[in-house]
Image (tube, rainbow, N blue to C red):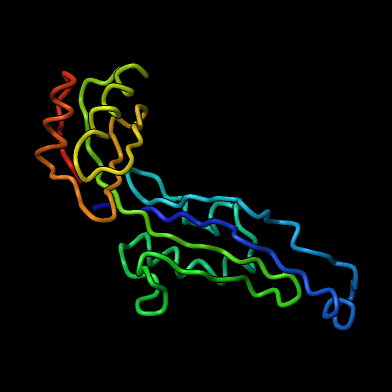
Amino acid sequence: MQYKCKVTVIDKKCFTEYQEQYLANPNSGPCPFYNVGDEFIFERYGGEDTFWRAGGGTQCAEAWDCISRYIYSALQGGSIMRGWINDDRMMIACCNDGTRPVIFKIQRLDYLVVKIEGMACEKCAARVREALERVPGVERVDVRLDKGWAEVFPSEDAQAEENALAAAVAGCGFTVTGID
C-alpha cells in the first residue's frame, strides 16, 4: 500500500476586532494566500516528493508549521489523529494566524500502484482505467501513462485483491510487472 495526502481548505475566518486592536495594519483582512476549496496533493513515491521544502512553495509558512506534521504522518501511512477524529485517516487543523485563520481538512489517501508494461497511449490508459474500476473493492483509478502505472484507490469497505487487478489488466492485453 502507498499513501498520498490531500489537503483541502474548508474555511477561512477573519476576526476584524482583533486586527483593529492588535495589528500594525488594522485592515489586514482575510488570509490572501488560500481560498476555500483549494486542494493540494502531497506524495512521495516513484521519485516524486512534493512534501519537501514546505510543499514546494505551495503553502504559507505559518500554515505549513501547523499542518506539515499531519501530512508527514499521512505520507508514512500512519493514523493522523487516532481517537480524536471519527476517521483515523483525517484531521481538521488550522494555521497559527489568530486574526485570520485558515481551516484545513487533511486526508490520507491509501492506494496501490499497479505497474503496467505496454501502455502506449491515452486509449490504452482509458481501457486499463475502465477495467480496473470494474474490479470489486476499487473506488477510483488514476492511470499515470507517463510513469507506466495505475494508482488504484480502494473502497472504504473493501480492498481489491491483487490477483483480480492483474487479471483485469491482462484482459486489456497488458502485463502487470509489479504491485506496490
5, above or below 177, in the image: below
Q: In this view, does 92 lie to the left or right of 79?
A: right
Q: Residue at 37% x, 19% y: name it.
A: 122
Name the residue rendered at 55%, 59% in the picture.
54
Image coordinates of residue 35 in percent, x first then y, are 68, 53
Residue 106 drawn at (x, y percent): 48, 62
Q: Which residue is drawn at 82% across and 80% down?
A: 18
Residue 25, given in percent of the width and then of the height, sits at: 90, 71
**Residue 178's x, y, as percent?**
16, 38
The residue depicted at 61 percent of the width and 66 percent of the height is 103
Residue 62 located left or right of residue 22: left
Q: In which image quadrant can residue 60 be found? A: bottom right
Report the number of numbered marks. 0
Classify 175 as above or below 76.
Answer: above
Quadrant of res 102: bottom right
The answer to which quarter of the image holds residue 121 is: top left
9 vs 146: above or below: below
